[in-house]
Image (tube, helix red, strand yellow):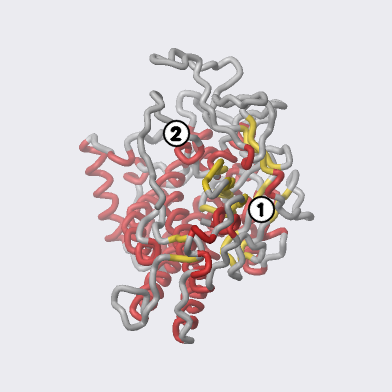
Amino acid sequence: MRAVENAVGAVIPDNARIIRNLINGIQYVQDHVIHFYALHALDWVDVVSALKADPAKTASLAQSISDWPNSSPTYFKAVQDKVKTLVESGQLGLFASGYWGHPEYKLPPEANLMAVAHYLEALDWQKDVIRMQAMLGAKNPHPQTWLVGGMAIPIDPSSQNALNAGSIALMNQLSKKALSFVEKVYIPDLLAIASFYKDWAAIGGGVGNYLSYGEFQNDDVSNTTNTWLPAGFIRNKNLGKVEPVDQMKVTEDAAHAWYKYSGGDDKALHPWDGETNPNYTGQKPPYEFLDTDKKYSWVKGIRYDGLSTEVGPLSRMLIAYASGHKRIKEVVNMVLQKLGVGPAALFSTLGRTAARGIETLVTAEMLPVWIDELDAKIKSGDLRIHNGDKWDPSTWPKEAKGYGFHEAPRGSLCHWVVINDGKVANYQCVVPGGWNSSPRDAKGNPGPYEAALIGTPLKDPNKPLEILRTIHSFDPCMACAIHVVDSNRDEILKVKVT
């Protein structure tokens, strides 16, 4: 939407801006919490070790770091029994593929039991709080209510089928539940677990370049730099200078990716000029083998100003911290102080994991602020939800280019559109997973994943737990990073615009 809005000059009403902030905000909170517990925490937590824990000692540990109500010996004993039943049945389900007993697990059994209990709680918690996105966006994680020039969801205090006072009350309730879990479970767990793994503050640093497009708009101008999370670029870990973002510095090459560029695969193209031409070894079935001598990825070599660049929560928190964002500086300094480490620890696997928690907390704190802002607009009588002047595509320019910035939970996302004769002539998207999982570029420089793994110590190459820790700290999503095509090049779907 933002790419087209930028191309056609659409300005969205304040209500649409606030609703977009709320949709993105609750997505951050839910996504980050579930990433930590369901994907990343078990890289540090030994589930089977929880069977050896003393539930009474586990309760004492939990009560020492938080006043969360589910912290009794009886509660933790029930969780332990549930895990024991799974282990004895031989059907570990979600826990089946872990490297349990690995020598790099350092938590005591009681901490493991506490984390496993909260893992299960998080799964139940997220089903409730994400209702806010369902109310505003109709679907999670891909909302369906965004329109060029605003939103499709109506505001009408007199209608039960629109946003009204009841909707505001429910969103306030859900936002409080979201913040409570983050404050009393996620952050205490994160700090408790991290305290046993401080050596990871020196592992997994990566490329040292960080990008954020900025997110959560403070005004209604498309692609504005006036955002609650600031935009910027940090070069070579220099927190003393945040450079402004120039979208023209984004390029992609195919030097080590299975695509073919008409001007040469090692030529870096801006997305407006981007090409997506899959390049198989065999162009007809059975397609035989891909060329693996020089190419090894379906992800293009994405670069900013020619540099391999990391995106995501760590990038956003570093840029906000270096830009003087008051609340984020407070929370970052609090986390560093509690762990007894300096700012240099942020450039690491541990720093990346901590940054996601920090971002979750400060975003959860903002949800009621945006809800109150929306409530005030409705009470003032301002019910506008889209810009009528840009509603009709027939009013759009026949020739235009646009780009739309967005900070997804995983990192910087931008779409570029070229419109010729009123039709889309080229459309390219550069997504978070693409930035972080980029292969080497034409100069041989590695992408963030590869760079972050250099120098990683391995106790057991057959059980590479340490590699999972660093890769999972990025919140990887290869499905987001690649372009998917039908191998037979058959038409799968036709969209008719009337």
Residue 341: which disc? 1
* Viewer can see residue 122: yes
Q: Nearer the viewer, residue 397 or 333?
A: 397
Residue 163: which disc? none
Residue at horizontal 66%, vertical 57%? 231
Q: Nearer the viewer, residue 317 or 167?
A: 167
Give SS at disc 1. loop
Residue at horizontal 76%, vertical 53%? 243
- The amino acid beneath tag 2 is Val
> Where residue 304 appears, x then y in whole percent?
69, 42
- The amino acid beneath tag 1 is Val
Q: Is residue 128 above or below residue 475?
A: below
Residue occupying the far bottom of the picture:
380
In the image, is 299 to the left or to the right of 232? left
Residue at horizontal 48%, vertical 37%? 478
In the image, is 258 to the left or to the right of 251? left
Q: Earlier in the sequence, mark 1 or mark 2?
A: 1
Crowding at dot 1, Cα within 10 Å, few <14 / some 14-19 / many 20+, comes out as some
**Looking at the image, is mark 1 or mark 2 nearer the viewer?**
2
Residue 484: which disc? 2
> Where residue 287 appears, x then y in whole percent?
43, 15
Q: Is residue 402 above or below residue 90?
A: below
Q: Is residue 116 above or below residue 467?
A: below
Residue at horizontal 34%, vertical 57%? 121
> Where residue 173 appears, x then y in whole percent?
37, 74
Q: Is residue 294 above or below residue 380?
A: above
Give SS at disc 2. loop
